[in-house]
Structures are given as C-alpha cells and as structure tokens.
Amino acid sequence: MAEAAAPKQTTRGLRKEREGLVVSDKMDKTVVVAVSRRVRHPLYGKTVTRTQKYKAHDEQNSARVGDRVRIMETRPLSKEKRWRVVEVVERAK
C-alpha cells in the first residue's frame, strides 16, 4: 500500500460542432442559430436543403443577427439550450 493511486485521466468525448447563421438575438446571453444541411430526397433523388434551429449560449452577447457562428455541443444549460457559441466566423454585412 506504499504506492499512491495515480489520478485517473478521463478523456472527454468528441463534441459535435456546427456552423450556422444567427437568426435571433433577442434573448439575454442566448442566440438562435439556423444550421442548414443538404440531403438527397429518398424517393426522388433531388437534393433538398434541411434547416434546423438550435438555441446556443452566448456569454458575451457578441453575436448579432446575420452573423455566421460556430457552435459546440455542451451540457444542458436550460430546457432547450444545449449548445454554446465558440466563435463568430463572419460578421453580418
């Protein structure tokens, strides 16, 4: 029992990242980000754009409507908020 137990190194799992457009910034420290993806229609084969909206935590209130931002998955922060803004990729013109 002379050996000291080495601290366990737990690796954090891969967290999902998305890039999208801010469509609403009316909440305090929260933005709504629309993320678009292109998928093929299962029957007709046409490429269709699908959009999903995520509520993301923005601690500095730095993102504005029209900005392109990168968001990362995180622990649940509220009922609908499970993402946080990592960076503003491009400012709105």
Image: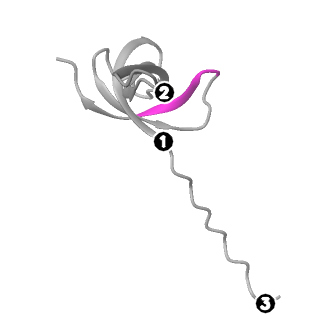
Most distant residue in the top direction: 26
Between residue 15 and residue 51, name the one nearer to us: 51
Q: Is residue 62 visible?
A: no
Badge 3 marks a residue whose secondary structure is loop
Q: Residue 8 sits in which quadrant?
A: bottom right
Position of residue 48 measured from the top left corner of the image (x, y, whole percent)? 36, 20
Q: Is residue 45 visible?
A: yes
Tell me the number on the disc at residue 2.
3
Q: CA distance from mark 1 to mark 2?
A: 15 Å
Q: Is residue 78 left or right of residue 57?
A: right
Q: CA distance from mark 3 to mark 2?
A: 47 Å
At 50% from the left and 31% from the top, the residue drawn is 83
Position of residue 54 measured from the top left corner of the image (x, y, whole percent)? 48, 23
Answer above or below: position of 9 versus 61. Answer: below
Q: CA distance from mark 3 to mark 1?
A: 42 Å
At 66% from the left and 71% from the top, the residue drawn is 7
Q: Which residues are magenta?
A: 79-85
Tell me the number on the disc at residue 16.
1
Q: Amino acid at mark 1?
A: Lys
* First reached walking from the N terminus: tag 3 or tag 2: 3
Q: Which residue is mark 2?
A: 57
At 51% from the left and 51% from the top, the residue drawn is 14
Q: Amino acid at mark 3?
A: Ala
Tell me the number on the disc at residue 4.
none
Between residue 43 and residue 78, name the one nearer to us: 43
* First reached walking from the N terminus: tag 3 or tag 1: 3
Residue 83 in magenta stretch: yes
Residue 87 in magenta stretch: no
Q: Residue 3 sits in which quadrant?
A: bottom right
Between residue 91 and residue 46, name the one nearer to us: 46
Most distant residue in the bottom direction: 2
